[in-house]
Image: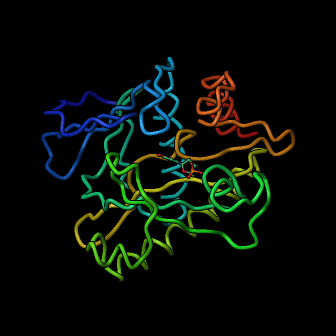
Amino acid sequence: MRQMEKGKQLYEGKAKKIFVTENSKQYLVEFKDDATAFDGVKKDTLEDKGILNNRLSAIFFGLLESRGIETHYIETISEREMLVKALEIIPVEVIVRNIAAGSLSKRLGIPEGEALNKTVLEFSLKDDELHDPMINHYHIYAMELATAEEMAAIEASALKINDILTAYLKDKGITLVDFKLEFGRYEDRVILGDEISPDTCRFWDSSSGEKLDKDRFRRDLGGVVDAYREVLRRLEGGE
Ligand code: TMP
């Protein structure tokens, strides 16, 4: 870790702040302890969540880089901060699902926990005011959110990321149920941005089915930070 001059704050989201740096091609991301759900209707501060998500995201990004997936991650700067490539974020959230859960179960009536016969990709417009509505390729092209070429790259990358993370986590006794990705433009290409953490994934203990992710917060199950810590312990412990 090294000292880093933090520039002006560019953006504050629900769980992270983004700062400019002296290098126009790099941003500093600060992970906060704030947790929200249901579009910020439910709010709390969970001590150390930001530290855990910074560590976990760095581990996942490092793993993906080692497997040939370019991410925005450059290096960890401090407990809560990472240096990243300055992306122009594409305002489309990409959701990858292996097992029915959450909003898919609600929408389609498939019981939570039922394996999907084929990996499902979904897209949402990244817009809090509109509550991140689900969209499809027609909307994406009509609104010029991304080109067909960009979407092809994003989808191929999302599926490859799913394969890498699923196998890696399986080894740690964790089932990757579903997760959300965000991509952005950098130079002439589209690369992975945002975070990969228990805030943005559903992780279930492979043997007990215990939830090790933000659903503990969304559903008032308690032990949120302990669950995040358990994920980190398994990833770092080489278990
Ligand atoms: P969902 O079942 O609520 O649609 O969530 C699907 C996945 O996306 C789950 O792993 C949690 C993640 N997610 C986010 O990262 N941000 C969000 O705002 C929402 C609603 C879900």
| Colouring convention used in this rendered image of the protein | rainbow
Residue 221, above or below 175: above
Question: In the image, residue 137 lies at what x, y percent?
Answer: 42, 77
| Residue drawn 74% across the image and 60% down it | 110
Q: Is residue 217 left or right of residue 172?
A: left
Identify which residue, 170 or 137, lies in the foreground: 137
| Residue drawn 24% across the image and 52% down it | 86
| Residue sticking out furthest to the bottom | 148
Q: Is residue 203 left or right of residue 34?
A: right
State which quarter of the image contains the N terminus. Answer: top left
Question: In the image, residue 113 lies at what x, y percent?
Answer: 78, 52
Q: Quadrant of residue 13?
A: top left
Identify which residue, 163 or 102, lies in the foreground: 102
Question: In the image, residue 131 lies at what x, y percent?
Answer: 40, 49
Identify which residue, 27 or 238, lies in the foreground: 27
Identify which residue, 110 or 71, lies in the foreground: 110
State which quarter of the image contains the C terminus. Answer: top right
Question: In the image, residue 134 lies at what x, y percent?
Answer: 46, 62
| Residue sticking out furthest to the right | 207
